[in-house]
Image (cartoon, rainbow, N blue to C red):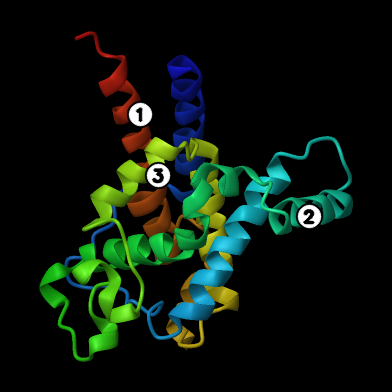
Amino acid sequence: MTDGYEKEAAQALEALNDKYGSAELDFSDKVPLNKILGWETMYKEALWFRWRILVARKSIAGKAKALAAVEARQLVESNKDSLAVCFGVRRQDAKNVLLALFDSQFRSLGPHLQTAQRESYRPVTDDRGAAFGITLEFDNADDIFRFLATIGVSPDDWLSLCEAFLWTMESHNAYIGDEDVEDLEKPPKECAYARFVAEFLARKGIKDGLALREKYAAPI
């Protein structure tokens, strides 16, 4: 099982490098504005649903694209898709977990620039989501990454999350500006948002999965 994960992780990391590049981001002076909180309800619902759809489509092999799309939607709507199974009883909280994770990772780009002007723009993980009317089990992004690794989010699932994030930024973000649209139209290796999700979400998620397996595979 560990070897299988390691192989899938290596393939996924290579795919990330091929599509998004491997150069580290430098946002020490220029930090993308975190625009997901202004419209967070619509955004998190769309992100979670799109991610599930993309993962479900990949699980349906050998069928025409249109038919696979229909079957993927049926899997998601009946909560039989692999991500719904991974989250189990926590499925209803998944969208809030994703919101907290993305918010934390956006803020990590320039923590010295994070000044909350309004209650609704405080970090989602503050008081475990109290300011947003939600209840989280996690205090920070590292806790969330460990949780996602523990429940079985796969390396390939992280690749799908990159696609879901970029799609949601374009289609379900009421506060997106001209500069964001211009960035999202760039090739993935030049797009700041694409490189952000690849480096700060997917790569870290995959590597945390590897670390967790190495920890439990080590002899006592």
- Residue holding disc 3: 148
Between marks 3 and 1 in the image, the one whose residue lies nearer the viewer: 3
Q: Number of labelled discs?
A: 3
Between marks 1 and 2 in the image, the one whose residue lies nearer the viewer: 2
User: Which kind of residue does numbered mark 3 sit on?
Assistant: Leu
Q: Quadrant of residue 105?
A: bottom left
Answer whether labels 3 and 2 touch (C-beta < 8 Å): no
The kind of secondary structure element at disc 3 is helix
Q: Residue furthest front?
A: 89
Answer whether labels 3 and 1 touch (C-beta < 8 Å): no
Dot 3 alpha-carbon crowd within 10 angstroms: few under 14, some 14 to 19, many 20 or more: some
User: Which kind of residue does numbered mark 2 sit on?
Assistant: Gln
Residue 199 in sight: yes
Position of 133 relative to 157 (above/below): below
Front-most of residues 17 and 173: 173
Front-most of residues 215 and 201: 215
Residue at (82%, 48%) from the top-left corner? 68
Residue at (49%, 70%) from the top-left corner? 44
Q: Does residue 148 appear to the left or right of 130 in the view shown? A: right
Identify the mark nearer the N-term, 3 or 2: 2
Position of 108 relative to 216 (above/below): below
Residue 185 in sight: no
Position of 139 relative to 81 (above/below): below
Residue at (24%, 49%) from the top-left corner? 142
Residue 152: image x %, image y %? 47, 36
Residue 161: image x %, image y %? 52, 53
Quarter of the figure that contains the C terminus: top left
The kind of secondary structure element at disc 2 is helix
The kind of secondary structure element at disc 1 is helix
- Residue holding disc 2: 74
